[in-house]
Image (tube, rainbow, N blue to C red):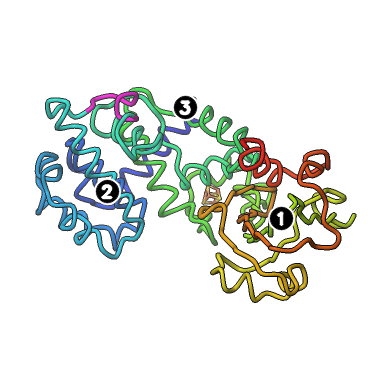
Amino acid sequence: MNFSQQLIDWYIVNKRSLPWRDTKNPYYIWLSEVILQQTRVNQGLPYYKSFVKKYPTVEDLAHAPQDQVLKLWQGLGYYSRARNLQTAAVQIIDNNSKFPDNYKDLLRLKGVGEYTAAAIASFAYGEAVAVVDGNVYRVLSRIYGVATPINIPAGVKEFKSLAGKLLDKNDPATYNQAIMEFGALQCVPKNPNCNICPFINNCVAYQENRITELPVKIKKTKVKNLFHHYLVIQTPSGKTVLSQRDTSSIWAGLFEFPYIESSGALLPQEITTNKLFRELVGGSRFRESVYNQQPIVHKLSHRKVHAYFWIIEVDEELSHSIDIIEVKTKPVHVLMERFIKEFWQKK
Ligand code: SF4
């Protein structure tokens, strides 16, 4: 099958008429692509029109007050995209107002990734680079029966390579528009109407009844945030208290300061009124300070530990305490290691 020709034939008959399709102006195309990353065409259209009206040139956008740009963006979410848009506009102005005219240079603009660069380069300049967005992943994985997950590096590479091979090098602009439109209107995520699809006889997903399986996306486990408040007790003779993790936990058998677990940052009074703290310190007088206002963060496969270290200077010796020097000989986990290195080994 001549994939690209069939696709373009379908596009010519079915395409929607959209203002950014009638222009080669890279600035307008860029605006439309950034807006459409945030929302669907129907919702994005009024935003596109407002931006073009208010800032008809990239210079206008670059010189606009940021608050005004953000106001115009309001409702689209991800305000960093609007800020990046303006930063990139300033980059263009600083480069003698020369809008980058190729894929490689477009990637240098703040916030412009591979997809947006490919879209601008092909739509505005006819450069032969294939766009790969969610629509493209879906269309290609179904028609060619590619089950490699689209959210792992090997999948990204495979789909990019396939998209590059299929690209119509003579008319990359129309081809790229066509495949995206095909994904948006025909090969939709749920219940595509395959009976009217021009690829019905060649589509692997249809032929093998795998439409709902493709594209494959690996479910990422939700990362759980843990907040640990380690109590670094220091007695007058230079001793501290350590505890050892039990064998069923992460970091099994390793040593650490006793810690309080919470659902977020804690105030000093929340530490000093905690049961564990009272048990450790007893009736001793103390002075407390937090060593790190910003937690030391350590990522595990599906957990993220935010560690605060509280320095507690007590005025009495405590039972079960050990010499601080001994702490350095104990096996400890990475958070402890970082703290010890930064706090005690500097001394
Ligand atoms: S036959 Fe169905 S699943 Fe296959 S490309 Fe067409 S619309 Fe998509």
Q: Position of residue 313 (x, y in %)?
A: 65, 59
- Name the quarter where the C terminus is drawn: top right
Identify residue type, mark 3. Gly
Task: Report which residue position mark 2 lands on.
Answer: 83
Kind of residue at disc 2: Arg
Q: Which residue is mark 1?
A: 236
* Residue at the image position 90 percent from the left and 54 percent from the top: 247
Q: Is the residue indicated by label 1 positioned so its CB lies within 8 Å of ligand 1?
A: no
Dot label at residue 164: 3
Q: Earlier in the sequence, mark 1 or mark 2?
A: 2
Please tell me whether residue 103 is drawn above or below residue 342 in the rendered image: above
Mark 2 vs mark 3: which is more N-terminal? 2
Label 1: how many residues lie within 10 Å, few (<14), some (14-19) or many (20+)? few
Q: How many marks?
A: 3
Bounds of the magenta span?
100-107
Q: CA distance from mark 3 to mark 1?
A: 69 Å
> What residue appears at the point 75 percent right and 60 percent down from the top-left corner?
258
